[in-house]
């Protein structure tokens, strides 16, 4: 009987410890397809409803380039939603993505906000992201967000680096969201 009790308690005790000893689970990347007009309509709506973006647009034409979103667009958000990196150059984005495979660079500091959408804004710009809204914001992870053309040669360095990153060990600590633009 005592052997049975010892066995029972050891099984029960290990069952309590196992959930704490598990490796962090891999976060599945989120892929959505979006029509170009949906992206443009959503972004223009954001510009006209965002006070800082609207003031940049109204103030002069020289600030208009700061409001442009070129592709491939890449942005890294902190767990608190602060933008830490923005880029629209495929090769520079690829270099940055590959540095993430070794961890988040400590030298990153929050960028100015207001002239580009927040991650919450992107969820509204792309309705297909709304089904993931709860999991995106409840995880409190870094978010690597990209808007890209899947087959455009100018985007390939960015896309290849994202694909490599998705399968790396580091990607488990970062939620990857990729919006693939379509011509329809």
Image: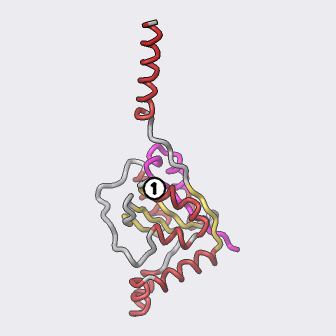
Name the residue at 38% across, 66% down. Answer: 83
Name the residue at 49% across, 45% down. Answer: 168
Q: Position of residue 72 (x, y in %)?
A: 53, 68
Describe residue 36's horizontal placement relative to residue 14 as left or right. Answer: right
Residue 89 highlighted magenta (yes or no): no
Segment tinted magenta in the rendering: 160-184
Q: Position of residue 133 (x, y in %)?
A: 52, 61
Q: Which residue is mark 1?
A: 138
Residue 161 highlighted magenta (yes or no): yes
- Residue toward you, 50 or 101: 50
Describe residue 109's horizontal placement relative to residue 46 as left or right. Answer: left
Name the residue at 51% across, 74% down. Answer: 70
Is 125 rendered above or below residue 92? below
Q: Counting other residues with Cα less than 10 Å from the Cα at mark 1, is it few (<14), some (14-19), or many (20 or more)?
A: few
Name which quarter of the figure residue 109 lies in. Answer: bottom left
Q: Position of residue 145 (x, y in %)?
A: 49, 62
Is 84 rendered above or below residue 165? below
């Amino acid at each position: 009987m005592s052997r049975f009790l010892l066995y029972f308690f050891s099984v029960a005790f290990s069952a309590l410890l196992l959930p704490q000893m598990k490796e962090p689970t891999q976060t599945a990347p989120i892929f959505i397809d979006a029509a170009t007009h949906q992206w443009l309509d959503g972004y223009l709506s954001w510009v006209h409803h965002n006070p800082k973006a609207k003031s940049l647009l109204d103030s002069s034409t020289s600030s208009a380039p700061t409001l442009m979103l070129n592709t491939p667009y890449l942005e890294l958000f902190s767990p608190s939603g602060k933008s830490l990196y923005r880029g629209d150059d495929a090769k520079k984005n690829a270099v940055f993505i590959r540095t993430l495979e070794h961890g988040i660079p400590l030298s990153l500091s929050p960028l100015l906000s207001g002239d580009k959408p927040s991650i919450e804004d992107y969820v509204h710009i792309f309705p297909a992201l709304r089904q993931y809204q709860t999991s995106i914001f409840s995880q409190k992870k870094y978010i690597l967000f990209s808007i890209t053309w899947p087959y455009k040669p100018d985007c390939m360095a960015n896309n290849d680096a994202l694909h490599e990153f998705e399968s790396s060990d580091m990607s488990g600590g970062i939620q990857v969201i990729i919006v693939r633009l379509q011509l329809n």
